[in-house]
Image (cartoon, rainbow, N blue to C red):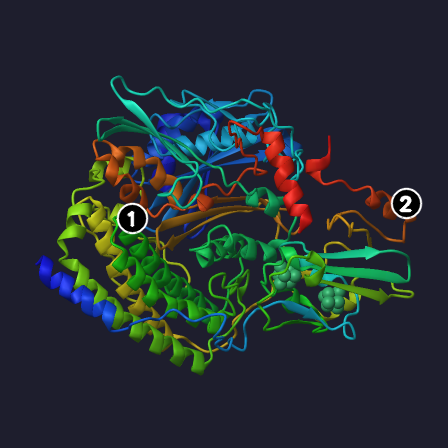
């Protein structure tokens, strides 16, 4: 693949190609000059690669440039292509690839906000990540900006929402709204009851996790912080980060540790799918499903407490392996619990599969076609419900997935119903994988130590299939025993971008379930930036007063 | 179709009945390896600062008030109960206890403070490295440390010999949101 790609790139771009190299069995790095980036991305995409995300990084101290990496996956031959370019900090403009690949839109806006790299020809160059009152010219992910900088906020600045299409009314949903579980703002444009468009303003739960991990902690603390990116797919982020660092350092971990990681990921999948099933039921007003799915799920939470010491943030994964072993008693415990869950989930499945009220609320709702889903690089069950046959566990096997057998359900009715069915099937598949893991797990060590320091400035990319889609982690190793750059792309990041399209021409009452069908995790999506600066405004108190009030409240404690 | 589904759903709900625990009146035993509140054994702690260096939420602070005295402070209000400190401690001085009912209205109720007599110790970290050989787990902040305990802030400046100036400077530490 490397040779073919190189030939294609050189034929079109000639001198703009700096080098095409393959660092390990599955990663190809393409370095191009700034002028050739858009064309290069087009060629790579044309060669059948699926766009993943873009990563910006600060290299100013070394050579006065800002770097940009567009990452792609070749799903049929298990390879990743990372297309890198740089722009001098004095003239930080490169050509946007969003006109060709719409799902790059957010990645590029994020880089503009956080690093000050601008993209010529971007169709919507608005703020994405930073708060509206964040001062111009401070780019939080640059190395010269301290991690705990709190610039002075401004009053009376608001995000300019998109122009409403003629003849429509705006219904604001959020930042705090009963049908949303996390803060984000949607302006939904409606004509009567029908949705004609929507604009999104989110990123209100920034916690600065990437910056924190790039400046404050060391490699082995990051998995614990990564785990807290998301309350639902914690192990996914911890595994993805650890794998990226291991691959950059060339560390091979014991096989038993890989099996335990697989086991944890699948246990997490069961819990997450049941959680989502409950939430979906709740969103369409069918609370029986909610109660029962969560009742069944509770057993897995208790199992995890016995297994890892905590209901959710398992803390099992470290760079180099896992922390706790699976003893024969625990293995037996896991077997019993998953048997029970399989049985009880079957009961739920039978009780709801033919229920007309569920069908009416989910069939034909939130439809987008397979082509649109491909254009927007949807991932996970949302993509599989639109006939796109991707699953990182099968296409880019990691941990012990190469040794277990499982089906990847793909449906093509393109609606919320298909998503629901897929997630239920995947829960049964997860149970199958857990049994295989327990049967096949080899003995031996569960952790291996790093002999030497991890060399600086190595790049590595990994994907891990989270219950709601694939998570991409990109790591550039650093000099001070911590990553120089760590980029997390959660599955909600691409999926959320396609929500306006899913909502188009739907009924307003279906908004919650269409939204809920992608299983949005705003905290995952919002992970970057520096501080949590909200432009919380209300008619009677100003932001400054609000701040002072909440500080006082905190200090009392 | 509708009716059979509803009947099935009724059965599904009736069979398990009420499952909600009558907490706190009823307290099921907690699993024995629960990661609850970490507790320190001051007899075992040698003051190497390893736990403070590797706490992901940076809630274990170290302050050398003079050559002889090192204060370690665990601020439970920010602890995530990950158990990393217990893993990293070369002396096994930290255990993750079973206590989880630790909601309180005063931060000091969940704060542990150790004052350790260090005599001639230069805080070089060698005692730690005797036990911990993983290259990415070594101590990053070696030497004398000056965290601000009032503000509960980790200060990343260290010095090879005790420096009264740095100690004084750390007293003036301001939270970023309080800076002008
Ligand atoms: S349990 Fe984790 S967060 Fe709490 S003090 Fe120990 S290392 Fe820090
Ligand atoms: S790691 Fe252990 S010995 Fe070292 S300071 Fe912490 S508790 Fe004490």
Count of numbered marks:
2
Please tell me in which quadrant of the rendered image residue B84 appears: bottom right
| For discs 1 and 2, the disc positioned in front in the rendered view | 1
Residue position for label 1: A283
User: Would you say the beta carbon of the disc 2 residue lies within 8 angstroms of ligand 2?
Assistant: no
User: Would you say the beta carbon of the disc 1 residue lies within 8 angstroms of ligand 1?
Assistant: no
Q: Is residue A476 left or right of residue A404?
A: right
Asked if residue B121 can be seen in this view, the reply is: yes
Mark 2 falls on what kind of element?
A: helix
Estimate the spatial distance between the alpha carbons at disc 1 and disc 2, rounded to whole Å: 60 Å
Name the chain letter of the residue that bears numbered label 2: B
Please rate how many residues cluster around mark 1, counting C-alpha atoms within 10 Å: few if below 14, some from 14 to 19, many from 20: many
Residue positioned 50% across, 43% down in the render: A527
List x then y, in percent, for residue B114: 79, 65
Please tell me in which quadrant of the rendered image residue A530 appears: top right
List x then y, in percent, for residue A366: 23, 40
Tag 1 near tag 2, CB within 8 Å:
no
Q: Is residue B29 left or right of residue B55?
A: left
Looking at the image, is B146 positioned above or below residue B19? above
Viewer-side residue, A80 vs B120: B120
Residue position for label 2: B165
Name the chain letter of the residue that bears numbered label 1: A
> Any mark on residue A256, and which?
none
């Amino acid at each position: 693949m490397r040779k073919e790609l190189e030939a294609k790139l050189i034929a079109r771009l000639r001198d703009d190609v700096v080098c095409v190299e393959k660092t390990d069995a599955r990663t190809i790095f393409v370095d191009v000059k700034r002028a050739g980036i858009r064309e290069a991305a087009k060629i790579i995409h044309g060669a059948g690669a699926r766009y993943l995300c873009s990563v910006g990084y600060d290299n100013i101290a070394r050579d006065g440039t800002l770097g940009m990496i567009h990452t792609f996956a070749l799903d049929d031959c298990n390879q990743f292509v990372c297309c890198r370019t740089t722009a001098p900090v004095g003239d930080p403009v490169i050509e946007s690839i969003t006109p060709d690949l719409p799902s790059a839109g957010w990645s590029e806006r994020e880089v503009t906000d956080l690093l000050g790299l601008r993209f010529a020809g971007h169709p919507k160059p608005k703020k994405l990540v930073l708060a509206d009152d964040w001062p111009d010219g401070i780019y939080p992910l640059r190395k010269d900006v301290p991690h705990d900088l709190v610039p002075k906020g401004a009053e009376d600045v608001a995000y300019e929402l998109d122009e409403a299409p003629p003849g429509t009314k705006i219904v604001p949903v959020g930042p705090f709204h009963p049908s949303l579980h996390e803060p984000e703002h949607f302006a939904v444009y409606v004509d009567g009851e029908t949705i004609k468009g929507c604009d999104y303003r989110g990123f209100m739960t920034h916690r600065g996790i990437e910056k924190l991990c790039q400046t404050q902690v060391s490699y082995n603390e990051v998995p614990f912080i990564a785990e807290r990116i998301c309350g639902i797919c914690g192990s996914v982020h911890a595994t993805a980060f650890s794998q990226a660092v291991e691959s950059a350092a060339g560390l091979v971990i014991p096989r038993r540790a890989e099996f335990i990681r697989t086991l944890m990921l699948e246990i997490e999948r069961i819990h997450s799918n049941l959680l989502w099933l409950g939430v979906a039921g709740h969103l369409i007003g069918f609370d029986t499903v909610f109660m029962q799915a969560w009742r069944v799920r509770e057993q897995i939470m208790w199992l995890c407490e016995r297994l890892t010491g905590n209901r959710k943030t398992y803390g099992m994964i470290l760079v180099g392996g896992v922390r706790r072993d699976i003893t024969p008693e625990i293995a037996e415990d896991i077997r019993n619990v998953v048997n029970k869950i399989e049985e009880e989930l079957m009961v739920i499945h039978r009780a709801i599969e033919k229920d007309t009220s569920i069908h009416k609320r989910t069939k034909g709702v939130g439809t987008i076609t397979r082509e649109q889903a491909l254009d927007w690089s949807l991932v996970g069950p949302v993509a599989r419900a639109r006939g796109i046959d991707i699953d990182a566990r099968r296409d880019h096997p990691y941990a012990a997935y190469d040794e277990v057998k499982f089906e990847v359900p793909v449906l093509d009715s393109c609606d919320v119903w298909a998503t629901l069915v897929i997630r239920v099937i995947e829960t049964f598949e997860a149970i199958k994988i857990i049994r295989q893991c327990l049967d096949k797990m080899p003995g031996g060590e569960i952790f291996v130590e790093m002999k030497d320091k991890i060399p600086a400035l190595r790049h590595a990319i990994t994907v891990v299939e989270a219950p709601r889609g694939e998570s991409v982690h990109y790591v550039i190793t650093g000099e001070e025993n911590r990553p120089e750059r760590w980029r997390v792309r959660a599955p909600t990041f691409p999926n959320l971008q396609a929500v306006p399209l899913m909502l188009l021409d739907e009924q307003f009452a279906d908004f919650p379930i269409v939204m809920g069908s992608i299983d949005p995790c705003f905290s995952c999506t919002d992970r970057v930036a520096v501080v949590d600066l909200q432009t919380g405004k209300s008619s009677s108190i100003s932001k400054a007063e609000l701040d002072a009030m909440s500080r006082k409240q905190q200090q009392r404690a | 179709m509708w009716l059979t589904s509803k009947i099935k759903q009724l059965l599904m709900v009736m069979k398990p009945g009420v499952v909600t625990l009558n907490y706190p009146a009823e307290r099921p035993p907690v699993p024995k390896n629960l990661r609850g509140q970490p507790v320190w054994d001051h007899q075992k702690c040698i003051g190497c600062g390893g736990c403070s260096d590797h706490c992901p939420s940076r809630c274990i602070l170290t302050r050398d008030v003079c050559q002889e005295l090192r204060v370690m402070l665990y601020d439970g209000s920010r602890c995530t109960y990950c158990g990393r400190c217990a893993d990293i401690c070369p002396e096994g001085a930290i255990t993750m206890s079973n206590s989880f009912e630790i909601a309180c209205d005063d931060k000091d109720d969940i704060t542990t403070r150790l004052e350790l007599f260090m005599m001639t110790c230069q805080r070089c970290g060698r005692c730690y490295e005797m036990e911990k050989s993983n290259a990415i787990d070594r101590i990053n902040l070696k030497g004398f440390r000056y965290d601000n305990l009032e503000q509960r802030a980790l200060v990343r400046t260290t010095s090879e010999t005790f420096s009264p100036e740095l100690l004084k400077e750390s007293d003036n530490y301001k939270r970023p949101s309080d800076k002008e």
